[in-house]
Amino acid sequence: MLVDFDYFFAQIEERRNPSIEGKPVVVCVYSGRSQDSGAVSTANYVARRYGIKSGMPIALAKSKLENVEAVFLPVDHRLYEEVSEKTMTVLRGYADYFEQVGIDEAYLDVSRRVNGSFEQAAELARRAKNDIRAQCELTCSIGISPNKLVAKIAADAQKPDGLTIVKPDQVESFLAPLPVDHLIGVGVKTKERMETMGIRTIGDLAKYDVRRLIEVFGRKLGTYFHNASMGIDDEPVQERGEAESMSRIATLKEDTRDLKVILDRTDRLCEEVHEDVRQRGLGFKSVGIIAVFIDMSIRSKSKTLDNPADELEILKRTVWELFEKLLSDSELNVRRAGVRVSNFAKEQKTQKQITSFLGNFEG
Ligand code: DGT
Ligand code: CA
Ligand code: CA
C-alpha cells in the first residue's frame, strides 16, 4: 500500500481553523523580500479548481484568485511535522513492514497480515482510513497493488479520500492509458523526448522496443523505463533507520520549567516510542532526552542502562531522572521536549554522535 495524505499542509490548516473550509486555501512559503514574493507550497482542492499549484509564485496565485474570497497562509512546518509523526505512528500499526518516504506518505507492506489477499488488503485500508480520520481528523488516499511502483500511481489515481486497488492481472490495463510522466523518473525533459519518439502513454512505452530505449536513454534508465511501463518492480518496503534510534519530540502546551508539566507531555511521548519499540520486539540500552529552550538553544542528556530494557516504566523513570538533572542546569523555560531510545539489544549499534541525535529529533 502507498498512503498519501490529501493536500497535506492545507488540510492541516483547515483542521486547525474549520471556518476556512470550502474556501480556496493556499499555503505559502514567503521569501520575505517583498510582500507577495515566494511560492505556493500547496493548496486545497477548492483552490486547485482555480489553477493553483505547488511551486507557483504567490503573486500569480493571488491574481488567479483575484475576485474570490481566498485564504493565504504561511507554512507552519513545526505543526506539520508533529501531525506527520502522529499519522505515521497510526499507520505503522497496519503494516508488517513500514517505510515513510516523505512528510505525508508511506509504504506499507501488508502481504503477510492479509495472506496475500487483495480483498483483505482493501478492508485493512478502509480500517486504516477510518482510524486516521478518527485519530487525526485527516483524509488520505491509498493505492494497493503488487508492488511499490504501481501502488504509488494507484494512490494518485483517485484523490482526495481515494482507495484504488490494482490486482496483478489489472496492472497492464491500469497503466497503459496513463501519460508517461506518471512514472517516477519521467520528468518534463524525458517526457518531451519520448513524445518525439511517439511515446505518449505508459502503454506506448511498454510496446516500444527495449533495445531502442537503451540506445536513447542508456542501459540503466532504458531498462528501468521498459520494466516500469509493464509495472515490474521488486523494491522491498524497508524500514528507514530502524536500528539506529526511535524518538519523538513535541511542543509543550506552554513554555515552562515545571517538571510536572514537562513530564506530563513526555510520558505520552514515552508511550508512543515504547509502542514502536514493542512492535518491533526490540530492547533499548540508551535513553535520551532533549529540550529546546525559549531562546531556541538545545540541551540533551542521555543515560545508558545496565541491561537492555523494554518496559515503559523504566523508560518513563529514566526520562524523569534526566529531565530533573537537565532542569537543574538551566534557568530558561522549555518550549519543546523530546524522548529517544537507542542502542537496541538486537542490533547492538554504537551510540551516535550528538549531531545525528539532533538530526533524528528534527527529522
Ligand atoms: P495531494 O497529495 O496532491 O493531495 O497534495 P499535497 O499537498 O499533499 O501534495 P504532496 O503529497 O505532493 O506534498 C505534500 C506536502 O509537501 C504538501 O502539502 C506541501 C509540500 N509540498 C509539495 N510540493 C511542494 C512545493 O513545490 N513547494 C513547497 N514549498 N512545498 C511543497
Ligand atoms: Ca499528499
Ligand atoms: Ca506526498
Image (cartoon, rainbow, N blue to C red):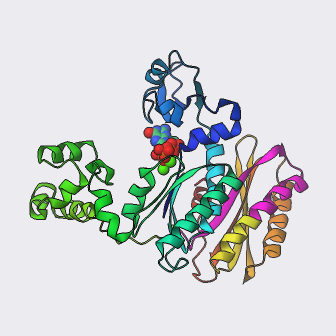
Instruction: Identify the image quadrant of residue 193.
Output: top left
In the rendered image, the quadrant that contains the C terminus is bottom right
Considering depth in this image, is 211 or 206 the residue closer to the camera? 206
Q: Percent position (x, y) of residue 302?
A: 72, 67
Q: Is residue 58 above or below residue 352?
A: above
Considering depth in this image, is 269 or 201 the residue closer to the camera? 201
Horizontal arrangement in the rendering, residue 239 relative to residue 278 (left or right): left
Considering depth in this image, is 94 or 92 the residue closer to the camera? 94
Instruction: Count the labels in the image.
Output: 0
Asked if residue 98 shows in the view, the reply is no
Q: Is residue 353 above or below residue 297?
A: below
Q: Percent position (x, y) of residue 225?
A: 23, 60
Q: Percent position (x, y) of residue 83?
A: 65, 50
Q: Is residue 243 above or below residue 217?
A: below
- On whether residue 328 falls in the magenta region, the answer is no
Kindly identify the residue that appears in the image at 81 percent across and 75 percent down: 314
Asked if residue 106 shows in the view, the reply is yes
Considering depth in this image, is 290 or 20 the residue closer to the camera? 20
Instruction: Identify the image quadrant of residue 85.
Output: bottom right
Kindly identify the residue that appears in the image at 45 percent across and 21 percent down: 64
Q: Percent position (x, y) of residue 201?
A: 23, 50
Kindly identify the residue that appears in the image at 58 percent across and 36 percent down: 75
Q: Which segment is the magenta one?
A: 241-270
Horizontal arrangement in the rendering, residue 266 relative to residue 123 (left or right): right
- On whether residue 268 falls in the magenta region, the answer is yes
Which residue is outermost to the top? 67
Horizontal arrangement in the rendering, residue 321 relative to residue 294 (left or right): right
Kindly identify the residue that appears in the image at 70 percent across and 43 percent down: 296
